[in-house]
Amino acid sequence: MYVDESGCDDQPRRVDAAVRCRVRQIAKCCDLPVKDTDIRLDRGRTLLVDVEASIGIRQDSLLSELDLLGREKVLLTSSFQDLTGKDQYEAATQLKELEANLEASYLLTSRLSNLSLLNYLR
């Protein structure tokens, strides 16, 4: 592995190491203290990790909400289909059956209204 005069290897294994190396080189060119640069890099990395964690928490929350809304949509769609999605022939058959029951009820009510003890005894 080749190491240049700044102490950085030419092919870093981690991106973080490559960034740190380049910032050190820039700091040396600008006559900035390397230690301050490292502290700033660490602070920046910490802030970046905090932001990533916050985004991850929000993303997880959004995924949970999306899953919940998806299940609710399926339930509501199913309920709507149960209420409105009847077959026309099935509905017509049920209507005819209800009409027949209603007519039988009217006929029975009519017979009961004409029933009296005098009519019964004849």
Image: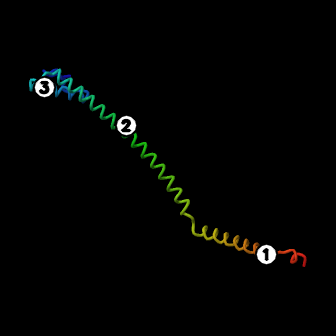
Marks 3 and 2: in contact by CB < 8 Å?
A: no
At horizontal 60% and vertical 68% (from top left) the residue drawn is 91
Labels 2, 1: front one: 1
Q: Residues within 10 Å of mark 2 (few under 14, many from 20)?
A: few
At horizontal 24% and vertical 25% (from top left) the residue drawn is 42
| Disc 1 element | helix
| Disc 3 element | helix
- What is the CA distance from the residue labelled 1 to the residue labelled 3? 108 Å
| Residue 120: quarter of image | bottom right
Q: Which residue is mark 2?
A: 57
Labels 2, 3: front one: 2
- What is the CA distance from the residue labelled 2 to the residue labelled 3? 35 Å
Q: Which residue is mark 1?
A: 111
Q: Residue at the bottom extreme?
A: 122
| Residue 103: quarter of image | bottom right
The numbered mark, 1 or 3, whose residue comes first in the sequence reads 3
Q: Residues within 10 Å of mark 3 (few under 14, many from 20)?
A: some
Residue type at numbered disc 2: Ile
Quarter of the figure that contains the N terminus? top left
Q: Which numbered circle lies on residue 27?
A: 3
Count of numbered badges drawn on the protein: 3
Residue type at numbered disc 1: Arg
Question: Which percent across, then down, holds residue 113?
Answer: 78, 75
At horizontal 69% and vertical 71% (from top left) the residue drawn is 102
- Front residue (pair 49, 29): 49
